[in-house]
Image: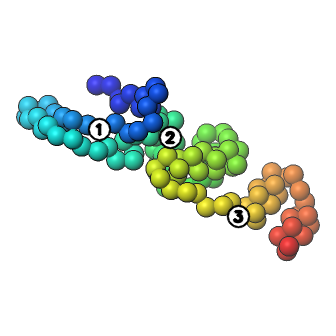
């Protein structure tokens, strides 16, 4: 079996399914069925979602597994949220300060000053 060919070139709407087949029983059901938002994810978003679920929603662990920076992982997560119909929340500016501190890009004193603002 092959995965759904999604996204399909030059198509912006989600496809409709017109037949379901249950191979073990040979049962076929015809009609017009909508796919849910997860069924229409791109392979990249689906792979990210699977990893996110596997690590129980821990973006720091996603960062570690993929070897990507936290901002990159967060951007991919925001892309996934948009793909399933949610608008991501604005990033907390404190997260950026803590990220820089963790990477050694700023000192603890600099971080403390920025967090007090």
Visible in this render: residue 55? no
Q: Which residue is mark 2?
A: 45
Q: Residue at x 64, y 50 (%)?
A: 74
Residue at the limit of the structure toward the bottom, as seen here: 116
Q: Nearer the viewer, mark 2 or mark 1?
A: 1
- In the displayed structure, 20 sits above or below 10; it is below
Of the numbered discs 2 and 3, the one sitting upstream in the chain is 2
The residue lying toward the viewer, choosing from 37 and 112, is 37
Q: Is residue 113 above or below residue 79?
A: below
Q: Residue at x 12, y 38 (%)?
A: 29
- The span from disc 2 to disc 1 (Cα, nearest Å) is 20 Å
Q: Residues within 10 Å of mark 3 (few under 14, many from 20)?
A: few
> Where is residue 50 shown, x and y percent of the image?
46, 44
- Which is nearer the eye, 8 or 68? 8
Quick one: SS at disc 1?
Answer: strand
Q: Earlier in the sequence, mark 2 or mark 1?
A: 1
- Residues at badges 1 and 3 in contact (C-beta under 8 Å)? no
How far apart in space, not on screen, are marks 1 and 3 (Cα)? 38 Å
User: In screen coordinates, is 102 left or right of 67?
Assistant: right
Residue 16's tag is: 1
Which residue occupies 21% across, 41% down? 32
Q: Nearer the viewer, residue 75 or 18?
A: 18
Q: Which residue is mark 3?
A: 92
Which quarter of the rendered picture does the C terminus lie within?
Answer: bottom right
How far, Cα to Cα, is label 2 from label 3? 23 Å
Answer with left or right where residue 71 lies relative to residue 80: right
- Residue 8 seen by the camera: yes
């Amino acid at each position: 079996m092959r995965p759904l060919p999604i996204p399909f070139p030059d198509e912006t709407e989600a496809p409709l399914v017109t037949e379901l087949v249950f191979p073990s029983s040979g049962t076929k059901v015809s009609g017009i069925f909508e796919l849910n938002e997860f069924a229409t994810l791109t392979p990249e978003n689906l792979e990210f979602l699977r990893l996110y679920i596997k690590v129980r929603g821990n973006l720091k662990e996603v960062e570690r597994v993929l070897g990507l920076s936290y901002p990159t992982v967060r951007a991919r997560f925001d892309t996934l949220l948009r793909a399933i119909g949610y608008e991501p929340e604005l990033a907390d500016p404190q997260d950026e300060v803590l990220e820089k501190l963790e990477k050694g890009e700023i000192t603890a004193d600099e971080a403390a000053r920025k967090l007090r603002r």
